[in-house]
Each structure stands twice: as C-alpha cells, then as structure tokens.
Image: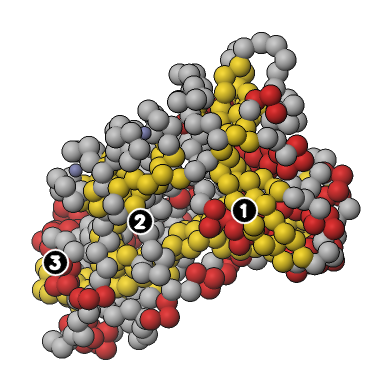
Amino acid sequence: MPSTFIPNSPETAEGLDIVAACPECGGGNSWRLLQTLRLCGYCGSALWWPRDPGRPGFLVAEDATERPEALLDVLQTLDAMRERSRLIGLLADRERANGKIPIDRSDDPTVPSVDDLKGERRHLFALDADYKVLAPYVLISSTLAFHALGRSRGGGLKEFRNLFFQLEEIAPAYQPPWNFRDRGLWVAKQRLRPFAPADFAFRPIARRDDAVQPERLATRWLRQRLLILPDLEPISFDSSLIAPNPWWVFRPFHYVRARTPMRDGWFLVDGQFGNVAGYPDADEVHRATARDWTPLDTREIRGAAARVIGFRCPECGADVPLVERTELQLCGNCGRLLAPSPSGLTTRPYELVDRASIPWWPKSGGVDVAWLPFFRVELSVTPAETPLLAEWPECWIPAFEALNVGRYDAWAFEWAGALTRIRPERCERRFYLEEPVEKANRVVPAAIGWETLRPLLPRLLVELLPKPAQTRLNPMILKKIFAGRFDVKKMTLVFVPAPVTTEGERRVLGPSSAVGWVPLRDGKWPPVLKRDVRRALERGKELAEPEDEEV
Ligand SMILES: [Zn+2]
Ligand SMILES: [Zn+2]
C-alpha cells in the first residue's frame, strides 16, 4: 500500500500554504510559502512574516485522522476496496468459466459500492490502540535557475537564456530505523500550520541535524535538461538554486492496533493523507509505543509566526495600501518606496527614467504607462579576458516578478538588454508627488530581491548581449566569462516607463516584442506560462518522446 500522494496533474503544485493565527485577533490566515506580507483577513492588521533561511520555521501538517472514527474509516475504506475487488474477481472467474470474456466492472452498479461495503462490514472492526507520532521532514521552497547556451525552438539560432523555475521539495528528516514508507512524496495542496505547544504531546521524533541540504534535495532537478527543452535545444548549461528557504514539517502518523477482516494487528496510518502506509513489525511498534521518549528541545522550536507592524509612511504619516505581491511598498501620498522592518516601514531610494528616453515609445496614439522596476548595476569586470562585458559601464536586470513566467521572462531580458545599450538618463523624481500616476497607469511591484540575483550576475549578463553576439558564444568563451570577477560598484532600483496600448487586447510594448498587460498588472499568470519544475518536466518529456522513438 503506497503512502504517497502523487498529483494527477502538475497544476496541483500550486496551493501549498500555511494557515497561521493572526497575533492580533487569532483569525487563521493562509500564507503562500514565501509570502512575507499580508493583511489579516479578519481584523485588517498588516502582518509581516520575515523568513530566516538559517533558522527554519517549524510546521505541522494537518491530521485528517485525529478522531478514532476517522482512523477506523481509513481501515474500513481499504478493506471495502479490497472486498469490492474480490467480488469483481469472483464475477470474472464465473464469466470465464462460462466461456465469456469478463467485462470491466469498475463502475458496475450491481457490485456493492465501497460505501455499501463499509456499512455492511462496520461491525467487524474494533480499534484497540492508537499511538500518534509526528515524523520530521524538511521542505524547501526555492527558485531553480538554468543558465543555458542552446539553439532556440523555432528559429534554431544560438542564444543564451536564463530560465527560472519554482521548486518545492520535501524529504524525510528522521533517523533510521524509523521508516514511514515514503516514496515520491509530494505535499501539493496540503495545509500546514505552525508548530504549537500542544503538539509536544504527540511525540515529535528527533530531526537529523544534517537534513537541510537544499542542493542534495534538489539534485534530481539541478541536472534535468528536460526542464529547458521546451525553450531551447541545449548545447551547454549549468544551474543554481536561488535563496532556498527550508522548513521543518512534522507529519502525523498513527500506529494503530485493530481487529479487522484483513488482519488483527498493527497498522501504520498516514494521518495527513488518510491512508494505510504500511504494516509495522514488532520493533517499530516497540519504538513508537515506548514509554521513554526523547523529547524535542522546546528551545529549538522557532516561533514560526507573523507579527503585526505599523503600515504608515514614516515620511508623511499616510496609511500605506498593502500590496501582498512584494516586500517593497509605495506610499500613495508622497511616493516614497518603503520596506518593512521590526520598527515599521523604512524608506528606500529609487530613480525614474523619462519616457523620452525610450526609443520604442509610440509617436502617436494614446498609451498608458506601466512603470517597470529594474536593477541598474555599475560594474567593474576583471580580467580583461571577458572583453564582451568588460566594456559595459552599467547593466540592467529585471526586478519584476516575470522571471519565472514563460514569454514574459524573455521579454523582460529584452528590455534589460536594450536599457543596457541605451543607458537612459535617470532622475530622482518621486511618484505621485512629481510624477503623477494616473488611474490607468501602474507601478509594477519590485518583487525580486537584489540579494537573490546578485550571485547569478555573470550568467545574467550574458543574456543581455545583442542576439548576434550570442550566436558567437561557445562553452569555452562562457567558461572564461564566468571565471571573471564582477564587482558591483553601485546598484540602484530604477523604474522605467513602458507603453501600454489602450485599444483591443492591451499589450505592453518592449524593444521588439510585446506581452499581455493584464497578467503583469495583476500578477495573475496564465497557469500554462508559469514555470515550475514539475510542470516543465512534463512538457520536456512530451518533447523528448518523439525523438526517443526515432532512435
Ligand atoms: Zn487579525
Ligand atoms: Zn508618504
């Protein structure tokens, strides 16, 4: 009996969230794994939940089998499914004996349903003992970046791409001989909550100290060329894991002794998924039911929780509207850029580019403005073996959340490459105050942290080269470039105006291509364009299969 839950479609990779009580009113709010700001859905408080990768938070998976009836139901369901298969087998045997070919009876209404069988056989079940334990797992949430030289799909031209994928992975963190029969474990669409003092009563098992090794957990993805196959036929590539965020997740299991028609004895029930994970032997039962139990050190448990912070502009005192997609907020009154801190909001500098600096600004016709955030980076590059890049006094890197969205990612780099060549003038005008943001215009949130992109710098820069220069790249040249030293002399966040067409399907215009405006404006991406490792692997496999047949 597998203990695994494998999603039917990669679509289900969304929706992994943590339900945590608001410290102000106690209301349960749900948070995406990496979300750090939100409004309480009950009392409206601004909540901030900073993550510290060095101190993973403690979470508990919800137990679907807390009550004895729920545990019995798990056993009854397994029994009824087996009984139904047995009845169908008997009918098939009879048909074969009569010289007929057995028909598919999985939907046959004349065979009693699982529910019917459960009802009929209820009196055959009794629960004699239930020992709950909490088994530790490590969950990482991260972005996987591929840096690939290859031939583009369609055009066949050599180009360099940085492709970003959302990655979540969970792995056991308990010591052998504990064994919870994990295989292909995935916790998509599961509810998690912060570890609470009451959970100590449920026998949390000690964690393996060395369990948090993001690179090891992500091994199967780091070298997986199928992920990038939908975008290009790779010649060479490497990959990096960006800002991996670990969590400890305790999953509930029950060692259950029961009398059932299947057997009288011990069952291991997975409380999170509500199924029978296996049949523990005497040693396992002894371990799980032992009187002496090494308790978890209470000091270890980090209070994984959001805190309430003031959301007033420190400059003008105005209430700041909270935007959940980003850490960096904008005061709608004085136009200050604001970042959360333990003492409330603090200001961050930024600059603006004038629309006269954008060569592809339409000469005629009405357009709205999308203000796109970029990191403008002044570099010194050594050694001179990297002449391609050494001549650049500055380069521009996208800071908006389109990097792991198909088509939008290439478009964002198209912009960054053009800005790197144009080197537009900047000024210190402020939104609202000096640069009006009319209702139809929007400031796109700066949702990517510089510290997460900084380590990727040489690899990001190669995609900024003009396309003709990219066709001359080869693995030797890349090796030399990546061996160079890239010292950041200065980094500034700059908002650049992008024209948005106002007629028909609204599009944001870039140097040579355009993308749909509404998804970028609202941060709601068509699922087919979102890059996550599981979905990309499925797509890559579809592409790889026809080739395999030819071989
Ligand atoms: Zn609240
Ligand atoms: Zn203000």
Q: Position of residue 249 (x, y in %)?
A: 33, 66
The residue at which mark 2 appears reads as: 50
The residue at which mark 1 appears reads as: 490
On whether ligand 1 comes within 8 Å of the CB at mark 2, the answer is: no
| Dots 2, 3 in contact, CB < 8 A | no
- Would you say 73 lies left or right of 387 here? left
* Residue 178 in view here: yes
Q: Decide: few, some or many residues near mark 3? Use Cα within 10 Å; few <14, some 14-19, many ≥20.
A: few
- Find numbered disc 3 in the image and state the secondary structure of the residue it sits on: helix
Q: Position of residue 221 (x, y in %)?
A: 59, 63
Q: Mark 3 or mark 1: which comes first in sequence? A: 3
Q: Nearer the viewer, mark 1 or mark 2?
A: 1
The residue at which mark 3 appears reads as: 198
Q: Quadrant of ligand 1?
A: top left
Determine the residue positioned at 13% across, 66% down: 198
- Find numbered disc 1 in the image and state the secondary structure of the residue it sits on: strand
Q: Nearer the viewer, mark 2 or mark 3?
A: 2
Kind of residue at disc 1 = Lys
**Within the image, what quadrant is residue 495 found in?**
top right
Determine the residue positioned at 72% across, 53% down: 461
Which image quarter is the N terminus in?
bottom left
Q: Mark 1 or mark 2: which comes first in sequence? A: 2
- Would you say 47 lies left or right of 403 here? left
Which image quarter is the C terminus in?
bottom right
Give the Cα separation between the discs numbered 3 and 1: 50 Å
Kind of residue at disc 3 = Ala
- Find numbered disc 2 in the image and state the secondary structure of the residue it sits on: loop
Q: Is residue 36 above or below residue 78?
A: above
